[in-house]
Image (tube, rainbow, N blue to C red):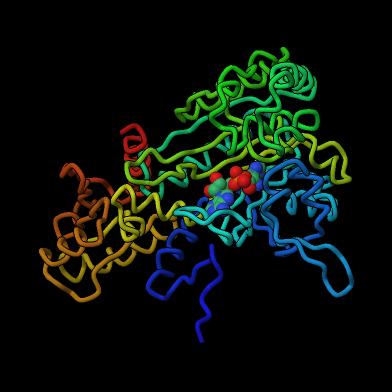
């Protein structure tokens, strides 16, 4: 027998699953902190869901879907992405009626696209997707983008580039579409047959064409930015302002068009700029989709979200020479010297964990030096030292292992101090 996994799919072997679990846990934890709740939708949906939302002139719908007839002659499709399903569920379960809008959802699971296999591109891949549906506040755009960036930063990635653009509202897009048709029409014979079809139906898709990518008319094509009306431009300005407030660095790229039809206003992509990451550098992509809920039969409800593949995240971690063990770093290792201090150490470790700080301590009554070695091996960020002297002062010695600095901190302000230090360290890493 010579049956292998289908092209574009992969087995994740027991030696590999540990790193998946670490990353999945990091994702779930981050979603929890940002208050996004998990939704699980079917792996297949009615084909029409994707033709209506992703768009019937897109590569995904035209070339990449796994579509089949079931025994009842229904046309079904293995989901190529998750936004359509999340929005379908939002409409079907009348989530627009929930008192707290936006409804903030996340999903993590396999998606299927019949694409050419290469490093970082698969036919079955796992996407984490985030959707915030029911608000047109530019602050939520910044929240969604910052969540994506926070995930990569927590995974230890530093070589990141965030690119944003505005695709404007319907009025802006109509004006831009007209300009595109005028630009391409006189020379359309030089383009592939797909682009010729796209010219009247959806000329924006021409800019996204992989075949005609190098045609000089692509570079001189009218830019959407020049066609944004006042309202769209003002919205984009506010998104940028909120990103500045959140201290999230970005570049504006007027040529960023996304490969799915439901987008308007904010669009963004996050790339890895790590050397050796390979040809495909996009880690995540997303944007606003203000017309999609209506398109799928619900009341007008604006939405925004993004998706990223876990496979590419793992590749990026490797490309930056980080190991997945780096992800599982400890916040604090608590070192106790003597039996009285041990009791305090147990209490401290427990209370740190209760407060979401990853903590470990010694359970072998080893010498201080051995405990210190463990802290190093486990890549703890901080060490808390408690001995008789410290007990007497109702304090612990807090040592920052990255700088070697240490300070005596009273037990009752330890938690606050540690939380501050951990936040400062994260900020510094971000600005590195
Ligand atoms: P997308 O840009 O088609 O957007 O895909 C998002 C991410 O999924 C990509 O940046 C990449 O990480 C991953 N991805 C896509 N195709 C493949 C593949 N063949 N192999 C590995 N990874 C892949 C969407 O899917 C939208 N639903 C995102 C979104 C959510 N927009 C709003 N909400």
Q: Residue at x 88, y 69 (%)?
A: 73
Whole-percent x, y for residue 240 in the image: 56, 23
Q: Nearer the viewer, residue 407 or 322?
A: 322
- Looking at the image, residue 134 sits to the left or right of residue 155; the answer is right
- Looking at the image, residue 276 sits to the left or right of residue 96; the answer is left
Q: Residue at x 39, y 55 (%)?
A: 357
Whole-percent x, y for residue 100 in the image: 75, 44
Does residue 168 lie above or below 300 as drawn? above
- Looking at the image, residue 400 sits to the left or right of residue 213; the answer is left
Whole-percent x, y for residue 43 in the image: 70, 64
Q: Quadrant of residue 209?
A: top right
Which residue appears farthest toward the bottom when viewing the image?
A: 1
Q: Nearer the viewer, residue 105 or 343?
A: 105
Whole-percent x, y for residue 185 in the image: 74, 21
Q: In which quadrant will I find the C terminus?
A: top left
Does residue 259 lie above or below 328 as drawn? above
**How many numbered discs?**
0
- Looking at the image, residue 263 sits to the left or right of residue 15; the answer is right
Res 90 visible: yes
Q: Quadrant of residue 74?
A: bottom right
Res 307 visible: no
Q: Residue at x 52, y 23 (%)?
A: 252
Q: Nearer the viewer, residue 330 or 235?
A: 235
Q: Residue at x 51, y 53 (%)?
A: 121
């Amino acid at each position: 027998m010579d049956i292998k996994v289908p092209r574009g799919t992969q087995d994740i072997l027991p030696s590999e699953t540990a790193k998946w679990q670490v990353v999945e846990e990091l994702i779930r934890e981050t979603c929890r902190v940002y208050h996004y709740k998990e939704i699980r939708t079917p792996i297949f949906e009615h084909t029409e869901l994707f033709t209506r939302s992703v768009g019937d002139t897109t590569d995904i719908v035209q070339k990449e879907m796994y579509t089949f007839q079931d025994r009842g002659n229904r046309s079904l499709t293995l989901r190529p992405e998750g936004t359509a399903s999340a929005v379908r569920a939002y409409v079907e379960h009348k989530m627009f009626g929930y008192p707290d809008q936006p409804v903030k959802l996340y999903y993590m699971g396999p998606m299927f696209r019949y694409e050419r296999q290469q490093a970082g591109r698969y036919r079955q891949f796992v996407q984490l997707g985030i959707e915030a549906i029911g608000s047109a506040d530019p602050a939520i755009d910044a929240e969604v983008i910052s969540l994506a960036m926070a995930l990569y930063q927590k995974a230890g990635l530093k070589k990141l580039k965030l690119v944003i653009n505005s695709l404007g509202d319907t009025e802006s897009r109509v004006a831009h579409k007209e300009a595109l048709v005028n630009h391409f029409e006189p020379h359309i014979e030089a383009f592939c047959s797909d682009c010729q079809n796209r010219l009247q139906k959806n000329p924006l898709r021409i800019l996204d064409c992989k075949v005609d990518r190098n045609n000089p008319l692509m570079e001189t094509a009218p830019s959407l930015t020049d066609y944004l009306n006042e309202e769209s431009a003002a919205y984009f300005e506010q998104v940028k302002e909120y990103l500045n407030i959140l201290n999230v660095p970005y570049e504006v790229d007027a040529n960023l068009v996304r490969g799915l039809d439901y987008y308007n206003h904010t669009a963004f992509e996050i790339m890895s700029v790590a050397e050796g990451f390979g040809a495909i550098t996009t880690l995540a992509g997303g944007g606003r989709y203000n017309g999609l809920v209506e398109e799928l039969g619900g009341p007008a409800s604006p939405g925004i979200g993004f998706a990223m593949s876990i496979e590419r995240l793992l590749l990026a971690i490797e490309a930056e020479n980080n190991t997945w063990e780096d992800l599982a770093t400890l916040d604090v290792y608590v070192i106790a010297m003597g039996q009285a201090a041990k009791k305090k150490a147990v209490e401290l470790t427990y209370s740190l964990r209760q407060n979401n700080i990853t903590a470990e301590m010694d359970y072998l009554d080893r010498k201080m030096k051995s405990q210190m070695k463990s802290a190093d091996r486990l890549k703890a960020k901080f060490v808390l030292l408690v001995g008789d002297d410290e007990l007497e002062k109702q304090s612990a010695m807090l040592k920052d292992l990255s700088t070697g600095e240490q300070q005596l901190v009273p037990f009752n302000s330890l938690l606050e101090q540690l939380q501050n230090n951990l936040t400062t360290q994260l900020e510094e890493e971000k600005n590195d």
